[in-house]
Amino acid sequence: MSDDAHLISLRDEVRTWLEANAPKGWRDAYAGMTHAEFAQAQRDWFQTLVRGGYAIPHWPKEWPGGGRSLAEQKVIYEELAQADCPRLLLSFVSTYHAASTLMECGNDTQKARYLPRILEGETWCQGFSEPGAGSDLASLKCKAERRGDVYVINGQKVWSTMAQYADKCLLLVRTNSEGAKQAGITFLLMDMKAKGVTVKPINQIQGDQEFCEMFLDDVEVPVEERVGEENAGWAVAQATLSSERGLTLMELSYRMRGALRRVAGLIRQHGRENDQGILRDFGQLVARVDSACAIADQFLLNRMNGIERVGDASVVKNTYSRVLREYSLLGLRLGGLEEQTRHAITYGDLNTGNWMADFMNSYAWTIAGGSEEVQRNIVAERMLEMQREPKGWAA
């Protein structure tokens, strides 16, 4: 079978499976859920995808549904977006960040212990950012002191996605303060139920609690839970952070294209079918969404062909976050005052149809995963080879 024929066959297979197994009416169901109920619904959907063989196509072939090529993964994520399935927010760090870290840098014992548990539904969070170490992650200060067979951790982490439901944490700590700041970082696997771990959800502007703070007071982590060597955690973290961006941004772009139907529905609902200004703005939005999808497709094609450049992912990320804001703003405008009142949040997507919540959340996407300004610097310095900004510069 030719490659094209194989991908067509795979697309038909995935589409047929989703017609039989994708959650029906999940948006209405999710809108009435508490956050804890949403987390359970996410676990159930993840297990359904595991059984179907579509949860971890990026894992090696020895795992159920793994060993897929990038082209095959693209087909699967396109079909998940087209079928308007819930995004896997709860298991995202587990199946991408944790799995990639363990596969690339973990020892055999760690892989055997944790990879099967992830497929069984064990949830991971990420303990990287701190109040004073966000985009400049290497400035982290959370301290780990080795005492015999354990590290004793003290410090604070912030912006840990769904940490309130996590079983384990990918934790970056400082074990040495001398020399280059990147050289004194160690990577640990921390039990979220360990004594001294306090998790506090952050109330966001749109009413969600997607992120958390973590306070670590004399938390003990066994030395055997270290990934890589002591003071060599920065290199491990790079493997963690580079694990998912391409396919994720492609999936998100395609989901936004599918969500255009909700904008069209608002135009009809409010009798604006003949409003030339609205039709103009909607047409421009459609073109912008199509361009975001095309840029994401080109990025993935470059990766498949081995010609991806440093900075390509930054272009995709900034394009998506800007278009997402335009999408949610048009929906908010069309809805008028009615859409500016408080409605139930539909967890599990960025294009929920709760236009005020979507619009406020769109601003977070110019910060999450590396701020827009940082991404522009990467493009300027690494792709366009412009002069780097001098260190210590001040107005």
Image (cartoon, helix red, strand yellow):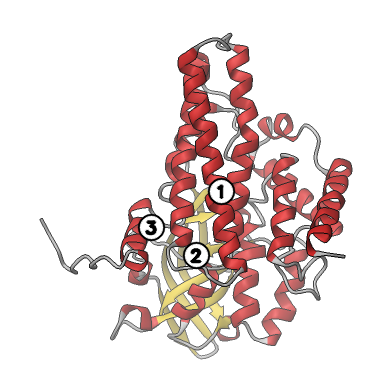
Q: Is residue 31 left or right of residue 164?
A: right
Q: Which mark is residue 375?
A: 3
Q: Quadrant of residue 325?
A: top left
The structure residue drawn at horizontal position 33% and vertical position 53%, both measured from the top left corner, is 373
256 left or right of 327 in image: right
Residue holding disc 2: 127
Residue 154 placement (x, y as % from top left): 42, 71
Viewer-closest of 304 and 213: 304
Left or right? Give the position of 43 relative to 101: right
At x 74%, y 64%, the residue is: 57
Q: CA distance from mark 2 to mark 1?
A: 33 Å
Q: Amino acid at mark 1?
A: Ala
Total numbered circles: 3
**Of the numbered discs in the image, which one, if any, rests on residue 126?**
none
Front one among 393 and 122: 393
Q: CA distance from mark 3 to mark 2?
A: 22 Å
Q: Pointers 2 and 1 in contact (CB under 8 A)? A: no
Name the N-terminal-most of marks 3 and 2.
Answer: 2
Identify the residue at horizontal 51%, vertical 11% (top origin): 275
Residue 40 locus on image (x, y percent): 73, 47
Report how far apart the C-alphas of labels 1 and 3 lie in the structure: 19 Å
Picture coordinates of residue 297, whole percent (x, y)? 59, 54
Please identify the quarter of the rendering in which residue 82 is found.
top right
In the foreground, 221 or 119: 119
Residue at which label 1 appears: 294
Q: In the drawing, does residue 59 fall left or right of residue 233?
A: right
- Which label sits in the foreground, 3 or 2? 3
Q: Nearer the viewer, residue 344 or 246?
A: 246
Residue type at numbered disc 3:
Gln
Which image quarter: residue 74?
Answer: bottom right
